[in-house]
Image (cartoon, rainbow, N blue to C red):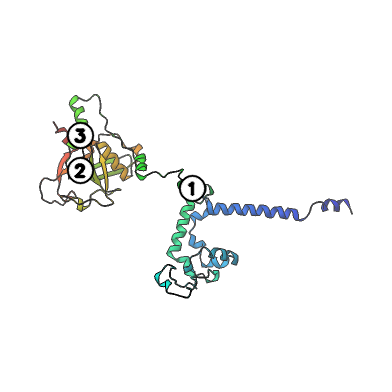
Amino acid sequence: MSRRSLRNAQVPPSAPATSKRKSDLVAAESDINKLLKLPKSKLTTKHLPDIINPSSWEIISSESRSRLSQFLPPTAFADYQKTLDPDHPSRVRQHHPQPSPGSHYPDLVLPVLFTDPHFLAAARTFQDHLYSGWLKDEFKANVSTYQEGIRNGSLAAPWKDEEWDRDHPRHDLLVVSPAKSRKSSKASTADLRLVVQVGDIISYRHNFAANNVLVEKDVLVHSINTDRSITVLMESGTVQHLPQYLLIPGPPDPVPPIQGMDVSSPGMLETGILDLDGRVERAKRPNGNAWKAFTVYRRRDDSWIDNNKGGRQQSGTLHYLRSTIH
């Protein structure tokens, strides 16, 4: 045997092919993980019905269809038969077993499945979860740790009230200048309860020119409390006017989406309104005189005026009414 033939015989011909197959498998597994788990997956930008449809179902291998068909509901197959729940009273009187609801045989998958609204909604939900990173292994591990902690008592979910107080701290934005006169200083710290009455509508209006946003909101004084605060009612979101049933004298109890809030100053009320409106970030809100941003509408008689205030007439701004207190 020549030296060249010996040198060639030292390397098995199958070794490079085996190594290449292993690297291909690793690369394929990595690509699948990126496709099905990571937020940057191309599936987040595709219209899934263009990918998952009767035509693509017929193209994939029979083994893949058999595995995927196990995840489909019984109603997705042509041999599905309606059955009663085993706990149904009529099942007690039956002496013969109910037919199987479906075989999950891949060739019996109904083509209409891929255009069913429930299937399309599930596909969009999958895309949302994929884009949000909820399918990553790290996120699933964190969820499992949290759930296990809840079960064994080592963790506790915060109460909704605690979350609200944490995300919406109550701050009085009213700043009193020390250069003002004594009378002005006393007026600036006047009790809001002395300025308004139950049944008043306090109308807020502020034009945030830098953000090109005009915020308007009507607030109903629901009660005056003993802890230097008042309880007000308002619509959630960007809705300005109150519903008609709250504008009549002696209105009934509010129902959602009406929001209730206890405030002790116009600054606190302004903060609550802007938080509910959601269009102006806290960092972009000017620290002005909130007393001048509110106008009070008060009912003077039982007459009804269709002015979105339930017949109430303008009495002046909180700033003006405060100045009348002696």
Find residue 250 and report its horizontal and vertical position in percent. 16, 50
In the rendered view, does 59 fall on the left or right side of 234? right
Which of 312/255 is in front?
255
Q: Camera-side residue: 160 or 65? A: 160
Residue placed under numbered mark 1 in the picture: 148
**Crowd tier of the residue under label 2, counting other residues whose Cα lies within 10 Å: few below 14, some 14–19, many 20 or above:** some
Q: Which of marks 3 and 1 is nearer the N terminus?
A: 1
Q: Position of residue 169 (x, y in %)?
A: 33, 38
Amino acid carrying label 2: it is Ser
Q: Which residue is drawn at 49% across and 54% down?
A: 44
**Disc 2 + disc 3, Cβ < 8 Å:** no
Q: Are marks 2 and 1 in contact (CB under 8 Å)?
A: no
Residue 87, image quadrant:
bottom left
Name the residue beneath numbered marker 3.
Answer: 191
Q: Residues within 10 Å of mark 3 (few under 14, many from 20)?
A: some
Q: What percent of the width, then of the height, locates residue 308?
A: 19, 50
